[in-house]
Image: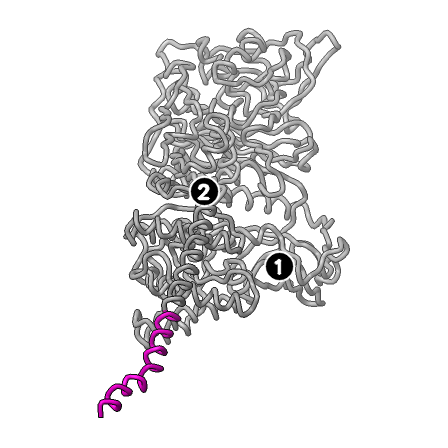
Amino acid sequence: MKRAVEEAPSETQPAAETRGTGRKLLSNAVFIILIVAAAVAGALSGLLLVYSTDLPQVTELETYRPSTITQLYDDQDRVVGQFALQHRVIDKYDDFPKVLRDALISTEDKEFERHWGVDVVRVFGAAWRDIMQDSRAQGASTLTMQLARNLFLSPDRNFRRKIQEVMLSIQIERRFTKPQIFTLYANQIYLGHGVYGFEAGANFYFNKKAKQLTLEEAALLAGLPKAPNAYSPINNPERSLRRRNLVINNMLEDGKITAAEAQRAKSAPLGLNVHAEPNDIAPNFVEEIRQYLEKKYGSEKVHESGLRVYTSLNLEMQQAAQQAVRDGLATYERRHGWKGNLLNIIANGDSLATYRHVDWDGSIAAGSYVHALLTDAGLVSATVHFGRYQAHLGPAEIKWTRYTSPQQFLARGDLVYVKVQELNGSDSRVSLEQESGVQGALLALDNSTGDVKAMVGGRDFEQSKFNRAIQAERQVGSSFKPYIYTAAIDQGLTPDDTVLDAPITFNTPSGPYTPHNYDGKFEGVITFRRALAHSRNIPALKVTERIGGIKTVIDYARKFGITSPLPMYLPVALGAADITLVEQTSAFTTFPNDGVRVVPRMIRKVTDYDGRVLEENYPEVRDVVSARTARIMVSMLREVVQHGTGAAASKLNHPLGGKTGTTNDFTDAWFVGFSPSITCGVWVGFDEKKTLGNKETGAMAALPIWMDFMRVALQGRESEDFAAPPPTPPNAVAQKVDTADTVPADGESH
């Protein structure tokens, strides 16, 4: 019994030894795991140390301001132009509607409200795919990670950048709230076509503010960050539509919208209303502003700092001015018949399928003039394409050319100039026009402030950046004559004094000079008032001699603000001097302003992004003549409109004054006129000094443009009137002027 008891432990000894061995192995395994973990931790720490040595500081976000648009506002604070390297408008969190936030989060980062900067599940899933597919680092980026990458890192897809992205994201989440992070992201992200941020995106793609986005519009924008170019609704509408509907499905799965809302939104068309840069509203004006701002503040500040520039322009007047100039030039072109000389893109080596004209990138509306591509020329009609639109040129549209069939003068591939009458997809309506090279310019000023309310520097800014309203010096013709009669009135002569309109020869150092009137006729004894109203050349020269010669007239022109060179010879009195439209228009503000000239002003105020005023400009005036003289001249210039060369303007039934101008050989046509509140000047001609054609006077070519503009500019001003001219002294005796002197002369005007 004792033996049995003593031998019992020996039966369990192997089990004990097994347990001991197991403990030892477990201890060794734990030890090895700890060593490996320490090594991994050390390696990771080393990697983090290496990758964080040049890591940006997220504290920069506290004062971060992305490159923003410098915007130009008209006199009603409406955007009429902008400058930017990145087209971006900064919004606050509440400016982004809930539907947009939901769409973006459902698509780009479902766990945005819950994660700490990194979605671990997505990151490991992406890493596993990278390992299995032997590819570069996959996406799986949260909104915070995308923000970190866009702000601080390169777009390269590699392991180093991904680690830095994660580290920065964690720091960002520690320092900023979710609304702050979302706002930074929503203002920073690229949405294609040079547009950054959802406010600028809503404006560009739909011509509305982000707050006004519908479900389908918000879904379209939310689908763009993944691949803005690939999903562009402009370049790839079908892919964009599929991407938009995917976003809507994501929102439905997340319970953000109902099934009915999703179905309605997915069945809606893209609904684009692409809003091109507003710079095409007043391109010459905007360019003048840009040059001024860059010279004063520097290019970087103008294009990146988000200045606010409050200009003098008026949107409605500017639009009316552009339409008036283009319509007036089109009317001129039709008067002179079809000239052809069209560019054919096929002959030029381009493809009908891929050709795209720069006109099609801007805003196209009824009334626009654009270049269209002729894709088919039939016996009865021709088919043209422009942008997304198609139209036909039938017998009515080509009648003015005097051809009966498009095939007689048009060919497939021709680039034709058309005026848009109606936009209706593939059934739009246009009229055939042409552009032979004739140009026009218009400038309108507010009489009381000098504010430039409208400026057109040429037919097409894309074809020629030359600003004919500011830069072109052209002979002004008889629109110069008011300076003669102003000097005469200042010297005590009156509108009722007379001058003999009869043949005369001036003896000059170069020989006899015999001037002529425009119509080749003579009216005998006429008053100053009639001589100016009917633009008689010989009376103007005689009055010039009576008041002291051409020097006196030039001195008066200088008082009116004319700074262009004025040669000291008699034909200058008839407008044989080159002057800019802005000079001549500004000078004419003296008459309705009781003898005070206003200096043209384009900028009222400039502020920085935070609203601090950088400059503020006030109206600047110059005393020129007495109020008495100015009022008498207004009465004489009103006669031009009522009964003289500008009589067509009387149809406007408004108090108006002005003066036509036509130069030798009809190379330049002018009309400069005013109401009590607005002064407007119009010039028509070719850039090279060649004739506009027989009888293309200021009254024929320029005045209709002026009238079309003034019809709009005068709206709401029906009650205005000029101050009454002073009464003629009771004992005044009319004087007769009939002199000739020996001053060289070599031209005449009308």
Element type at marker 2? loop
Could you say which quadrant of the image residue 716 lies in? Answer: top left
Mark 2 to mark 1: distance in Å? 71 Å
Question: Which percent across, then down, holds residue 217?
Answer: 40, 63
| Left or right: 95, with 548 as reference point | left
Nearest the eye: 86 or 483: 86
Residue 48, magenta (yes or no): no
Nearest the eye: 86 or 466: 86
| Left or right: 147, with 102 as reference point | right
* Residue 421, placed above or below residue 252: above
Could you say which quadrant of the image residue 727 lies in? Answer: top left
Q: Which residue is mark 2?
A: 53
Q: What amino acid type is highlighted by mark number 2?
A: Thr
* Residue 57, placed above or below residue 742: below
Magenta extent? 1-26
* Circle 2 crowding by C-alpha within 10 Å: few under 14, some 14–19, many from 20: few
Nearest the eye: 641 or 251: 251
Magenta segment's dominant SS is helix
